[in-house]
Image: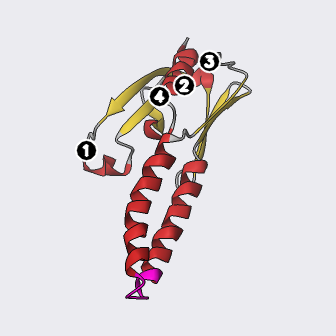
């Protein structure tokens, strides 16, 4: 994969869609089967189906875009964050939690550090193809 610092887009990969589909199907299939005798289970299956749809929408919004020497990271719940590529000092991969409040951050993440040694951007590593994300990050820092 050849990345161009001028124009590049990376979207979420298929793996999270497959994992969430399996998790939701494990819950929906028994509810549909049980709904023959208990019609109220259909309501629960509908709620899980709606959550499944929201999960797909959430996953579809993850995007990393490079355009005009600017890196843009977009998520549904976190919004859009833009940083200039020239402000990036280094990029590190981090797994785990540093403190209690970091429970809101992704467990596996790419942290982009600026020249003042402050985290500029935290990217959820699990929704992107690992090889493509690593190649992109390697190309960004040189």
Tell whether position 87 is magenta. Answer: no
The colour scheme used here is secondary structure
Q: Which residue is mark 3?
A: 1
Which comes before the other along the chain, label 1 or label 4? 1
Residue sitting at x 43%, y 61%: 24
- Expressed as whole percent of the image width and height from the top left, the position of residue 74 reads 60, 44
**Residue under circle 1?**
99
Sequence order check: which comes first, mark 4 or mark 3? 3
Q: Which residues are magenta?
A: 35-42
- Whichever of labels 1 and 2 marks the residue nearer the N terminus, that label is 1
Identify the element where label 1 is drawn: loop
Q: Main secondary structure of the magenta part?
A: loop
Element carrying mark 4: helix
Q: Tell me whether the residue at label 3 lies in contact with that at label 2, contact meaning CB atoms closer than 8 angstroms.
A: yes
- Cα distance between the residues tagged 1 and 4: 25 Å
Q: Earlier in the sequence, mark 3 or mark 2?
A: 3
The stretch drawn in magenta includes residue 40 = yes
Question: Gap between marks 1 and 3, in whole Å?
Answer: 36 Å
SS of the residue at dot 3?
A: loop
Q: For mark 2, what is the residue?
A: 132
Q: CA distance from mark 1 to mark 2?
A: 29 Å
- Separation (CA) of disc 4 from disc 3: 12 Å
Q: CA distance from mark 4 to mark 2?
A: 6 Å
Residue 15 appears left or right of 93: right
């Amino acid at each position: 994969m050849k990345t161009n610092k001028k124009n590049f887009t990376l979207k979420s990969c298929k793996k999270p869609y497959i994992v969430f589909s399996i998790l939701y199907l494990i819950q929906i299939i028994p509810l549909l089967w049980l709904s023959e005798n208990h019609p109220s289970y259909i309501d629960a299956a509908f709620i899980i189906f709606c959550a499944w749809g929201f999960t797909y929408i959430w996953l579809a919004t993850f995007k990393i875009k490079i355009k005009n020497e600017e890196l843009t990271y977009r998520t549904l719940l976190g919004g859009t964050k833009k940083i200039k590529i020239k402000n990036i000092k280094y990029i590190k991969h981090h797994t785990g939690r540093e403190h209690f409040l970091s429970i809101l951050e992704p467990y596996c993440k790419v942290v982009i550090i600026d020249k003042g040694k402050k985290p500029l951007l935290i990217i959820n590593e699990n929704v992107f193809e690992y090889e493509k994300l690593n190649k992109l990050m390697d190309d960004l820092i040189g």
